[in-house]
Amino acid sequence: MQIRSALISVYSKEGLEPIIRQLHALGVQLYSTGGTQTYIEQLGIPVTAVESLTGYPSILDGRVKTLHPAIFGGLLARREPGHLAQLETYQIPQMDCVMVDLYPFEQTVASTNDAGQIIEKIDIGGVSLIRAGAKNWKDVVVVASQGEYALFLDLLTRQNGQFTDDDRRELARRAFKVTSHYDTAIYNWFNQDSEDHAFKHSITTSEVLRYGENPHQKGVYYGNLEEIFEKLQGKTISYNNLVDIDAAVQLMREFLSEKPTFAILKHTNACGVAARNTLVEAWKAALACDSTSAFGGIFITNTKVDLDTAQEINKLFYEVLIAPDFVPEALEVLTKKDQRILLKIKSFDVQQLSFRSLLNGVVEQDADLRTENASDLKTATQRAPESAEIDSLLFAARCAKHLKSNAIALVKDQQLIGMGCGQPSRVDALRQAIAKAKSFGFDLQGAVMASDAFFPFPDCVEIAHEAGITAVIQPGGSIKDQDSIDACNARNMAMVMTGLRHFKH
């Protein structure tokens, strides 16, 4: 199909000039509106105003320019005798191509809270032109945004204005992606204070990944990492990196009000977490939790990375390091190994909703944003936990919340010294946690235990006591809670219940 006429109405003029000149060189009749018409005229290229077709000027402060049968007839007419005869009857020219770049709605939302300004950046005519051209893709070439300028110019130049069925269909596909993205952004703005959860946080950008979870799987990320991170250096972020980074941010969000805290994650599970008076001490304590698993892990902290800490971190290979900031001297050390990913996190805010694909659909739920504090603890045993135990119990509960179920976290002195997760039995998870702690030389005497769900039997309390654990935190809710309480009382252990379960499948 040869382009002989084109309607051009775009917001962004960047990259437009070579397209206009190439269309003109090919003898294409140009039609345009407002600022785009002026731009084309300033290039010395002849152009026809749409007003000469519609018989109406731009009205209502520019809200109505192209919404007219004289425009949409030329776009929607199939190139068949019946439709072409109607175009001739009503003296409507065929439109072989339509170029649009929509008003910058998202950029306006990002730059102002003025609802009036935002509303005026909801494009009506532009979206209608795109949809009309894309619907009639067999007969019309549609260019739906500045993002398609380069592709269009390349095809236009190489093929002397001729576009194949495949070319037109691909541009139509891109066009509907543009309008879907645009409408979703508008919906999200209107829906921001609504109780209607559906698509409240719909994704409007995407990035093709090198591959998915494994090299034989394709992968795409739908989202905008730049809203959350400033990437300071490193290789391309992979699917598995993204999953681990998400887990790291979710975990560290629990410790934002704590003293300097460091966490090390591997395959989304924390293998080291510690809080100390200085960051370098927190790093060393987190690493000591499981120095084997830390190799190639994801590192995250709640405070600025200083030089001493950077020098210690740099001794170990890692995939990703995330921090609110880095002192210049720390960056100088860390950036010498340029494949390692450094992320400066802008916000620890997380989505209010979570989604997961399964079977032939998707499940949506509220994100688990509840975090226990001291006032949530209900002492169930004769012995109440001491002040230091309470601090450790809360620390342990936050760790257990972010381990795969069944999950057990063992903590002593604000340090995760043992963890068990992803086990079919809670007893298995506890034995795993105890074995891990002992393998790294930790003394469990005086440690505390957190469980992500209740104990249906007293066996975990009995095993924990034998290992030296003195206090337990769990949600409660089993019909046999009293059995575990009695087991604690018989051993002078403290047990608190939160009433809040944190399963993580």
Image (cartoon, grey):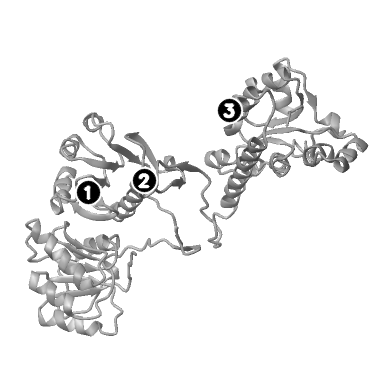
Amino acid, disc 3:
Ala
Amino acid type assigned to the residue bearing label 2 in the image: Pro
> What is the number of callouts on the image?
3
Decide: few, some or many residues near mark 3? Use Cα within 10 Å; few <14, some 14-19, many ≥20.
Answer: some
The first of marks 2 and 1 along the sequence is: 2
Say if 351 sits above or below 459 in the image: above
Mark-to-mark CA distance, 3 and 1: 45 Å
Left or right, 367 with reference to 340: right
Residue depicted at x 62% and y 35%: 145
Q: Helix, strand, or loop for circle 2?
A: loop
Please tell me which residue is depicted at 65% across the width and 31% down the height of the picture.
11
- The mark that comes first in sequence, 3 or 1, is 3
Per the model, the C-alpha gap separating discs 2 and 3 is 30 Å
- CA gap, disc 2 and disc 1: 31 Å
Q: Nearer the viewer, residue 158 or 323?
A: 158
Disc 1 residue type (three-letter): Phe
Q: Position of residue 279 (x, y in %)?
A: 19, 44
Q: Identify residue for label 3.
A: 150
Q: Is residue 354 above or below residue 344?
A: below
Residue 387 visible, this orientation: no
Q: Which residue is mark 2?
A: 215
- Name the quadrant of the C terminus: bottom left
Comparing marks 3 and 1, which lies closer to the viewer?
3
> Which secondary structure lies at badge 3?
helix
Residue placed under numbered mark 1 in the picture = 262
**Secondary structure found at label 1:** strand
- Tell me which numbered mark, 2 or 3, is placed earlier along the sequence: 3
Dot 2 alpha-carbon crowd within 10 angstroms: few under 14, some 14 to 19, many 20 or more: few
Q: Position of residue 212 (x, y in %)?
A: 39, 48
Disc 3 and disc 1 in contact, CB within 8 angstroms: no
Q: Is residue 192 left or right of residue 445?
A: right
